[in-house]
Amino acid sequence: MGQRRRLCEADWQYIYEQKMAGKTCAQIAGELACSRACVRKWWRRSRSHGYVRVRPKALGRPAAGPLASFPLELRQHVVALKQAQPRWGGRRILAELRTQAVAATVLPSASQITRYLKVTCPDLVRAPQRLPPPARACACARSQSLCGIRGTTCRCFASV
């Protein structure tokens, strides 16, 4: 059995028009040299959504990565905001997107924006700053000026 040719968009439109004209799936399949199941599949899709929305279903796993499921314009806008204001984080950029009434109906979360910026432009994302550990309180009765708080070491720490 030979390989069947793949149907193109013109074929999908032809199936829709011929079915609307009253032809059967078997007649259309004979004309296009494809199976009746294939004609039936495209007829069902076009009938339920109208011909305008007939597209093949995407195969495989969905796009991976932060903000991959959001429009390209939104991702570019996020990067542009970060480049214009390098000190802004994910929360501030999200607030700005909300005030600017971006065309996207659904906006990403602040954590998604932060992850996207870390992947896309890591040079603009600052590493979190670590605070130094708190100074240990001295157990002796001396004043703080003699203990380790102001830079001089106290003898009571030496025994610990």
Image (cartoon, rainbow, N blue to C red):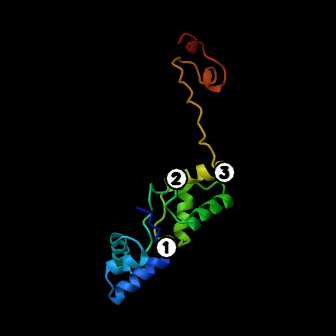
Decide if residue 97 is on the left or right side of residue 151. left
Could you tell which of marks 2 and 1 lies nearer the N-terminus?
Answer: 1
Q: Which residue is mark 1?
A: 8
Could you tell which of marks 3 and 2 lies nearer the N-terminus?
Answer: 2
Distance (Cα) linking label 3 and label 2? 19 Å
**Which residue is situated farthest in the top direction here?**
159
**Residue 101, x across and y down, in percent:** 53, 73
Q: Which mark is residue 108?
A: none
Amino acid type at image mark 3: Leu
Structural crowding at the residue carrying mark 3, measured as other residues with C-alpha within 10 Å and reported as few (<14), some (14–19) or many (≥20): some
Image depth: mark 2 or mark 1 in front:
1
Q: Quadrant of residue 34?
A: bottom left
Q: Which residue is mark 2?
A: 65
Q: Could you tell me which secondary element the residue under label 2 belongs to?
A: loop
**Residue 95, x across and y down, in percent:** 53, 63
Where the N terminus falls, by quadrant? bottom left
The answer to whether 136 is drawn above or below residue 57 in the figure is above
Amino acid type at image mark 1: Cys
Looking at the image, do the residues carrying marks 1 and 3 touch, with CB atoms under 8 Å apart? no
Could you say which is closer to the camera, residue 6 or residue 119? 6
Image depth: mark 3 or mark 2 in front:
2
Structural crowding at the residue carrying mark 2, measured as other residues with C-alpha within 10 Å and reported as few (<14), some (14–19) or many (≥20): few
Amino acid type at image mark 2: Gly
Q: Could you tell me which secondary element the residue under label 3 belongs to?
A: loop
Decide if residue 151 is on the left or right side of residue 20. right
Distance (Cα) linking label 2 and label 1? 31 Å
Q: Which residue is mark 3?
A: 124
Distance (Cα) linking label 1 and label 3? 45 Å
Could you say which is closer to the camera, residue 123 or residue 133? 123
**Which residue is situated farthest in the bottom direction here?**
21
Could you say which is closer to the camera, residue 81 or residue 158? 81
